[in-house]
Image: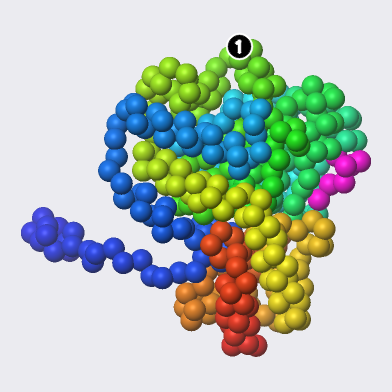
Amino acid sequence: MNVIEHPASALHFPALQPPKRYLFGPGPTMVDPRVYAALSKPIVGHLDAYFIQIMSDVQQLVKMVYGANEASTLVISGTGSAGMEAAISNFVEPGSKFAVFANGYFSDRLTEMAKRHGANIVRFEKAWGEVYSDAEARDFIRREKPQVVAFVHAETSTGALQQGKAICDAAHEVGALVIGDCVTSLGGIPVNFDETGIDVAYSCTQKGLSCPPGLSPMAISERATTWLRGRTTPPRSWYLDLKLIHDYSTVSHRYHHTAPISMFYALREALMVIAEEGIENRWERHRRANRSFVNGIEAIGLKMHVPAEHRIANLSTVKVPEGVDEAKVRKQLLEGSGIEIAGGFGPLAGKVFRIGIMGPLATEENVQFFLKEFKKALGVQG
Ligand SMILES: *Cc1c(COP(=O)(O)O)cnc(C)c1O
């Protein structure tokens, strides 16, 4: 095509008209209309007193969802992985001993980032879908005596929930800081940041918080803040330097980078939707929807990948029945019913469906709608 001779026609695309989707996958998840409305509000400057107030409101609301009243909170401009990289680059120095509970895809990503930051890595490996008992967690940390420990609270690749209390207690005993990945758990199930003793937590906007992707809310304990103040070398990432971001967002409000204004509007609205429902009511709604979902799945004759006591209420992994091509089921669901779910990957490729029942979808009516369509898709694929 000769773009120079036909510039107008070459660059003409139809108006935006995204297909209607029911986002029953691990994320992005469904967004409340109020959040879309917030996204369309006019922007102001990133140093405007109005925007500074918005950032401050968001920090307060983020404390509420984390259960982090004694911590400081801030929001990274970037998705969950940016929060992960901020945690690693600020708290893992070259040569630091970094211990990771490695039982899924996101603990591998943490490992890879820590490796790139020059950490000395020790991994406690388990199969995807398994979790660590309190005694196992304690023994590992006492034996290794790391400077930083990382675990994934809700491992989205496997559907398994890792409790953090024993990990945090043992880590503090040996003077280590704990990084907790709360990307899928925040807003969907309790994180209890203060009570658990996590030092650095990061999340995203597009999973448990029912907001479009683009920001990573973080919580940082007093202990971690003190450690960071004492750090003598600057982190290798300038953009994700938490001292600089904290200074911009909370202290001097001097320019660091241009915060994505509209996304902050959206996150504030998404968090207000949660605050109005009540965070505990929201968790309970997710638990109820999950019970109903699991009952329905078992009634169809399917099995869950993770034992009941280690499941994540807002993200489930269902075993793919023998002889079923899971990719075809997902295609059928998407094309026939507009429903998006995800498959497994890594060691779980072809073996599980990953299904998120969260935010606005976590109601009895939506669970029954999903089960009906899922059964139909499975039937079509034999
Ligand atoms: C989604 C996810 C991430 C990465 O977040 P992005 O927003 O995709 O960058 C990290 N950890 C866990 C547990 C996740 O589910």
Relative image position of residue 92 (x, y in whole percent): 65, 26
Residue at x-position 52% and y-position 59%: 29
Splitting the image into 4 quarters, where does residue 129 fall? bottom right
Assign a secondary structure to mark 1: loop
Residue 284 counted in the magenta span = no
Splitting the image into 4 quarters, where does residue 90 fall? top right
Relative image position of residue 145 (x, y in whole percent): 83, 26
Residue at x-position 74% and y-position 74%: 295
Residue at x-position 69% and y-position 47%: 190
Residue nearest the viewer, comparing 66 with 77: 66
Q: Around disc 1, counting alpha carbons within 10 Å, would you say few (fewer than 14), some (14 to 19), or many (20 or more)?
A: few
Q: Taking the image as drawn, is residue 327 in sight?
A: no
In the picture, measured across the screen, residue 229 lies left or right of residue 136, that is left
Quadrant location of the N terminus?
A: bottom left
In the picture, measured across the screen, residue 39 lies left or right of residue 135, that is left
In the picture, measured across the screen, residue 241 lies left or right of residue 154, that is left
In the picture, measured across the screen, residue 297 lies left or right of residue 37, that is right
User: Bounds of the magenta span?
Assistant: 131-137
Residue nearest the viewer, comparing 91 with 298: 298
Residue nearest the viewer, comparing 144 with 18: 18
What is the count of numbered marks? 1
Vertical comparison of 368 with 56: above or below: below
